[in-house]
């Protein structure tokens, strides 16, 4: 989907990039990674959820840098869809993994009797670190002028 299709479908809206917001989202994704590492041994479910949000925030950073914002009720899902239109096909499997994490996070929040294993949490943290670094590199490459200020 191109940007105009995303806007027509009501998933996104054009909005000029805001440097302060972009930098805050970028920094927050790294703070989330650190928080997930810190709670991994004491609360594996929250470590998983925080790792998911680190990934989601870096995608939101990319979306904002592209001059878009997510619209609609399911912001998390919409950010993933919008990011899929921005990123190359090489990221399809990573975005699918992130979408599975989104559903798993929502299920855990709504149905707390479905625990997240320590292995899932550890793997989520590994995936999140890799994902955040990859997306951050793309942001730096595509939008270096925004990040120099």
Image (spheres, rainbow, N blue to C red):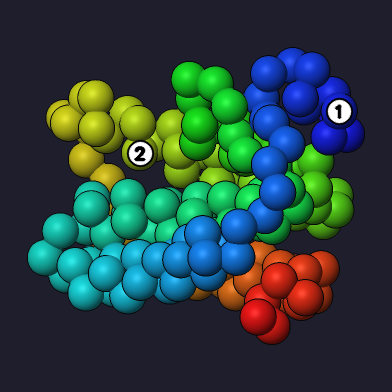
For disc 1, the marked residue is 4
Residue 126 appears in the figure = no
Q: Residue at x 65, y 80 (%)?
A: 149
Where, by quadrant of the figure, is residue 68 drawn? Answer: top right
Image coordinates for residue 103, horizontal then vertical, percent: 44, 32
**Nearest the eye: 63 or 21:** 21
Point out the image quarter for the N terminus: top right
The number of numbered discs placed on residues in the rendered structure image is 2
Name the mark nearer the viewer: 2 or 1.
1
For disc 2, the marked residue is 105
Horizontally, is 31 left or right of 142 in the view?
A: left
Image coordinates for residue 100, horizontal then vertical, percent: 51, 38
Q: Is residue 75 above or below residue 86?
A: above
CA gap between label 2 and label 1 equals 30 Å
Residue farthest to the top, as pictured? 9
Image coordinates for residue 99, horizontal then vertical, percent: 55, 38
As drawn, the label of residue 13 is none
Badge 2 or badge 1: first in the primary sequence: 1
Q: Residue at x 71, y 71 (%)?
A: 146
Q: Residue at x 21, y 74 (%)?
A: 38
Residue 62 appears in the figure = yes
What secondary structure is found at the residue carrying circle 1? Answer: helix
Query: Dot 1: within a 10 Å radius of its alpha carbon, few (fewer than 14), some, or many (20 or more) residues?
Result: few
Where, by quadrant of the figure, is residue 77 drawn? Answer: top right
Q: Residue at x 35, y 72 (%)?
A: 31
Horizontally, is 95 left or right of 113 in the view?
A: right
What secondary structure is found at the residue carrying circle 2? Answer: helix
Where, by quadrant of the figure, is residue 104 drawn? Answer: top left
Residue farthest to the left, as pictured? 42
Horizontally, is 134 left or right of 53 in the view?
A: right
Image coordinates for residue 15, horizontal then vertical, percent: 68, 41
Q: Is residue 10 above or below residue 56?
A: above
């Amino acid at each position: 989907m191109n940007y105009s299709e995303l806007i027509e479908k009501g998933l996104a809206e054009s909005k000029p990039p805001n440097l302060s917001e972009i930098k805050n989202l970028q920094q927050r994704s790294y703070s989330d990674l650190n928080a997930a590492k810190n709670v991994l041994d004491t609360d594996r479910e929250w470590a998983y959820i925080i790792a998911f949000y680190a990934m989601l925030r870096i995608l939101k950073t990319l979306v904002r840098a592209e001059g878009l914002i997510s619209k609609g009720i399911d912001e998390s899902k919409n950010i993933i869809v919008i990011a899929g239109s921005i990123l190359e096909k090489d990221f399809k499997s990573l975005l699918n993994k992130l979408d599975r994490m989104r559903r798993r996070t929502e299920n855990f929040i709504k149905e707390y009797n479905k625990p997240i294993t320590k292995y899932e949490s550890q793997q989520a943290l590994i995936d999140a670190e890799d994902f955040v670094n990859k997306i951050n590199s793309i942001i730096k490459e595509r939008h270096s002028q925004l990040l120099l200020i």
